[in-house]
Amino acid sequence: MRVLPYGEQAALVEVDTPGEVLGLAETLRADPPAGTTEVVPAARTLLVRFDPALTSLSRLSDELVTRDRRPARRAGHSTVTVPVRYDGADLAEVAALSGLPPKEVAAYHRAGEYVVAFSGFAPGFAYISGLDPALHVPRRDTPRTTVPAGAVAVADEYTAVYPRQSPGGWRIIGHTDHPVWSIDQDPPMLLAPGTRVRFAEVRP
């Protein structure tokens, strides 16, 4: 673990794996060090914001290095099932890149044990870890200017559901009508970090 200064009111914690990020985030949320105001997970870093009137970077760093950062067990987290039609525009490309028939791509995708690692890129966009290594494919060379809301896609070690229409370079393998982001929901983001996710196939 490395703890780096990030401005005057935050520390950036570097660890080795997304699981460690989630484990440390859970630990800090359950028992926050004095003066901590927010924890924000990313792929392999955790931003820890603090009130400098209540603590210091040095004291916070000393506390952070003692904390448990083992991969989260995820007990108590909700599980969200996302119904998917495996009819994406890039399904054949993912099949070619992985050496699997399209039906097997869908089967491998459904079989994953997923957890939301972090969010970013756009409101409600969840980076979901647990994708089978067979489906670790690169982003498209040329991103699309428009990806529809509900597109289910893969890129590198993650899968995701596009929360709304936006540009994007991930490879689309399917679609869902299940809303993952809406200001009319409470909370607006369905797939918050730590949430377990299942994908279930529905026929077009």
Image (cartoon, rainbow, N blue to C red):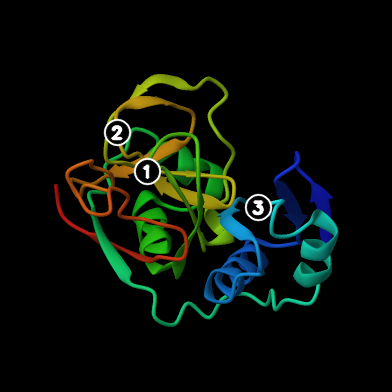
Residue 164 bears which disc, if any?
Answer: 2
Q: Is residue 170 above or below residue 33?
A: above
Q: Is residue 197 above or below residue 162?
A: below
Q: Which of label 3 and label 2 is nearer to you?
A: 3
Sequence-first disc among 3 and 2: 3
Could you tell me which secondary element the residue under label 1 belongs to?
Answer: loop
In this figure, which residue is indicated by the disc labeled 1?
Answer: 124
Q: Which of label 1 and label 2 is nearer to you?
A: 1
Residue density around tag 1, few if under 14, some if 14–19, many if 20 or more, within 10 Å: many
Q: Which of label 1 and label 3 is nearer to you?
A: 3
In space, the residues marked 1 and 2 are separated at their CA atoms by: 8 Å
Q: Position of residue 153 (x, y in %)?
A: 41, 43
Residue density around tag 2, few if under 14, some if 14–19, many if 20 or more, within 10 Å: many
Q: Amino acid at mark 2?
A: Arg
Q: Amino acid at mark 1?
A: Gly
In this figure, which residue is indicated by the disc labeled 3?
Answer: 51
Q: Position of residue 125 (x, y in %)?
A: 41, 42
Sequence-first disc among 1 and 2: 1
Residue drawn 14% across the image and 47% down it: 204
Label pair 1/2, CB-CB below 8 angstroms: yes
Q: Is residue 118 above or below residue 8?
A: below
Could you tell me which secondary element the residue under label 3 belongs to?
Answer: loop
Q: Quadrant of the N terminus?
A: bottom right
Could you tell me which secondary element the residue under label 2 belongs to?
Answer: loop
Residue drawn 27% across the image and 48% down it: 188
Q: Amino acid at mark 3?
A: Asp
